[in-house]
Image (tube, grey):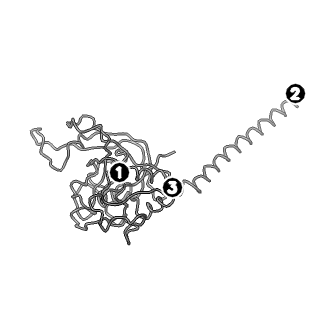
């Protein structure tokens, strides 16, 4: 009788191991299937930004006597430099293009007036749901915040925060521009090139960050999810806390000095501009 009971216990253990192992295997297969059929498409052309601390913001240089040196290229709202921890995330390698945005409009039947409110007859305006001819790979512009947010959500993503955007641009070592610390005006599509319009995404190969993210110094400026809030210890006391959203990055109308990774701009969520686009981000799950 004792041997029979022991045999039954051993059988139960074996079955438990088999069922438990089978459950784990089934779970792994589900994860693999999700990646192959869903996540793989979502993560296409995205870059993993690892979690950790990075240097956000800048300090205004000081003279030998300790007095602050006037630095006209640095805005007070981007000071002081401080260390920020963020969790790992994914971010689009490129800005969202006209062709991608058109797919979003068609799939969702969303109506969006992609027309410059300042110049409603401009050649770069959309004609209803059609972008300007020959610009399928140019970054979409004239999108307001809600357009950008809705498009990212349709893709299974979200807009990046300004912290995430800055880390993706300057890396862990606090670079001034996506490409490094030396001012080189020909590396990105900024005002110095005098191209007077955006180029196809990724067409400026030197405008690339340490994490291999393109067009963060030039081409077009980008929406973020973040509200305009002060940095800890900043000397700027007014202008924060409203409904304005933070805009990041430089663009074809912006000079190279104002296109640094740490530079901050703001706009109301209803703003549409011929140099304002976006890229998407995604949590790691």
Residue drawn at (32%, 41%), measured in percent from left and top? Answer: 243
Task: Give the image quarter of residue 218.
Answer: bottom left
Q: Which comes before the other along the chain, label 2 or label 1?
A: 2
Residue at image mark 3: 42
Q: Position of residue 9 (x, y in %)?
A: 81, 32
Crowding at dot 3, Cα within 10 Å, few <14 / some 14-19 / many 20+, comes out as: some
Q: Identify the residue at the far top of this view.
A: 2
Residue at image mark 1: 223
Q: Nearer the viewer, residue 195 or 245?
A: 245
Indicate the secondary structure of the residue bearing disc 1: strand
Crowding at dot 1, Cα within 10 Å, few <14 / some 14-19 / many 20+, comes out as: many
Q: Identify the residue at the far left of this view.
A: 65
Q: Nearer the viewer, residue 26 or 72?
A: 72
Between disc 2 and disc 1, the foreground one is 1
Residue drawn at (34%, 46%), measured in percent from left and top? Answer: 162
The CA span between labels 2 and 1 is 73 Å
Task: Give the image quarter of residue 87.
Answer: top left
Q: Identify the residue at the far bottom of this view.
A: 134
The CA span between labels 3 and 2 is 58 Å
Q: Which comes before the other along the chain, label 3 or label 1?
A: 3
Indicate the secondary structure of the residue bearing disc 2: helix
Residue drawn at (30%, 39%), measured in percent from left and top? Answer: 242
The CA span between labels 3 and 1 is 20 Å
With respect to residue 16, does 173 lie above or below?
below
Residue at image mark 2: 2
């Amino acid at each position: 009788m004792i041997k029979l009971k022991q045999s039954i216990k051993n059988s139960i253990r074996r079955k438990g191991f088999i069922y438990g192992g089978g459950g784990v295997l089934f779970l792994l297969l589900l994860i693999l299937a999700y990646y192959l059929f869903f996540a793989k498409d979502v993560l296409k052309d995205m870059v993993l930004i690892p979690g950790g601390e990075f240097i956000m913001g800048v300090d205004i240089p000081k003279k030998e006597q300790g007095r602050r040196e006037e630095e006209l290229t640095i805005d007070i709202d981007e000071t002081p430099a401080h260390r920020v921890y963020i969790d790992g995330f994914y971010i689009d390698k490129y800005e969202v293009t006209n062709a991608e945005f058109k797919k979003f409009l068609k799939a969702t039947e969303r109506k969006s007036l992609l027309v410059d409110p300042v110049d409603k007859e401009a050649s770069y305006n959309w004609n209803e749901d059609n972008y300007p001819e020959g610009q399928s790979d140019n970054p979409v512009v004239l999108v307001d915040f809600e357009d950008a947010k809705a498009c990212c959500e349709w893709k299974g993503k979200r807009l990046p925060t300004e912290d995430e955007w800055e880390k993706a641009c300057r890396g862990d070592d606090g670079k001034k521009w996506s490409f490094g610390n030396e001012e080189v005006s020909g590396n990105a599509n900024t005002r110095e090139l005098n191209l007077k319009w955006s180029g196809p995404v990724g067409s400026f190969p030197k405008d690339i960050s340490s994490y291999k993210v393109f067009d963060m110094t030039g081409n077009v400026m980008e929406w973020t999810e973040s509200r305009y809030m002060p940095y800890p210890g900043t000397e700027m006391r007014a202008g924060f806390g409203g409904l304005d959203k933070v805009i990041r990055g430089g663009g074809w109308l912006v000079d190279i000095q104002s296109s640094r990774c740490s530079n901050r701009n703001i706009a109301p969520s209803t703003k549409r501009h011929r140099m304002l686009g976006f890229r998407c981000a995604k949590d790691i799950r």
